[in-house]
Image (cartoon, grey):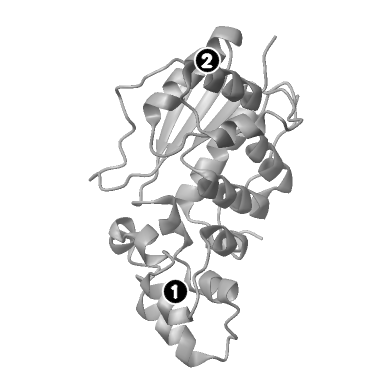
Amino acid sequence: MCLTPAAQAARFLTENDVLPPEASRASSEEAPASRFVLYVEGPSDREILRSWAWRVSPELARALAQAAVILGGRQPARAADHFRAIRSQCADARGLCVLDRDGSAASVPPTDFSEPGLEFFTWGRRHIESYLLVPDAILRAAGVPTEDRRQTRLVRRHLPPLHDEPALREVHAKALLAEGGVLARALGRPLSPGHIARQMDRRDLHPDVLDLLGRVAAGLEGAPSWGERRFSLPTDPSQE
């Protein structure tokens, strides 16, 4: 019998002491059985992805949260080891491991941890948080009135222009959004990445984000808990 990803995570944690406590705690949730596992680096990543998914399909957001297993950092080897254990119980299992690019020059998937059925997705920008650098979403998250031109200028001064993709690829978004970062100082308080993600509209979602959500939807479709259900995702982020 195929176990849920959360139950597999808890079992693997007990046997190998690899996955972090978040995966173990998830085993207590009554998640539906699934043959798809979504590996993410941390709880913040899961929260961001769930918020983005909610903008295109609340049903997808719920399924994504249930399928997520937290690695505790950029740990592709942990994902491969855990997924190997799942495949030993469910031969047709599929997995998707989402990784930050960090300081690498290119978003090349890791090749040392190949495992049948497991796909690696590496963000084109440095961090998942890099896709949160949408001025209007940050201003909404901070509760800055649209007529407050001074605060608006301060925020925009510290962000690369939305049309400058090379700059957005390389900016250190984690530092920019950190509790003691320049945005927190400009606004007078820090903003959590998850809160910013919840303030983003569908038109704010970068093509990389829609690409990832499409892969998650494809992995979930056909899983036992979802049957023949299909998730409807936009092909153009400007669609409403």
Closer to us: 223 or 44:
44
In the image, residue 212 sits, relative to residue 203, either above or below, namely above
Image point 41% across, 39% down: which residue?
Answer: 73
* Residue 184: image tag: 1
Closer to us: 12 or 100:
12
Image point 42% across, 65% down: which residue?
Answer: 177
Q: Position of residue 88 (x, y in %)?
A: 54, 8
Name which residue type carries label 2. Glu
> Which of the two discs, 1 and 2, sits closer to the camera?
2
Q: Position of residue 13 (x, y in %)?
A: 53, 22
Left or right, residue 148 beside residue 74 = right
Closer to us: 226 or 9:
9
Image point 37% across, 74% down: which residue?
Answer: 182
Image point 29% across, 63% down: which residue?
Answer: 167
In the image, residue 12 sits, relative to residue 73, either above or below, namely above
Q: Which residue is mark 2?
A: 15
- The reply to whether dot 1 and dot 2 touch (C-beta < 8 Å) is no
Q: Quadrant of the N terminus?
A: top right
Gap between marks 1 and 2 measured at Cα? 42 Å
Q: Position of residue 54 (x, y in %)?
A: 67, 51
Dot 2 alpha-carbon crowd within 10 angstroms: few under 14, some 14 to 19, many 20 or more: few
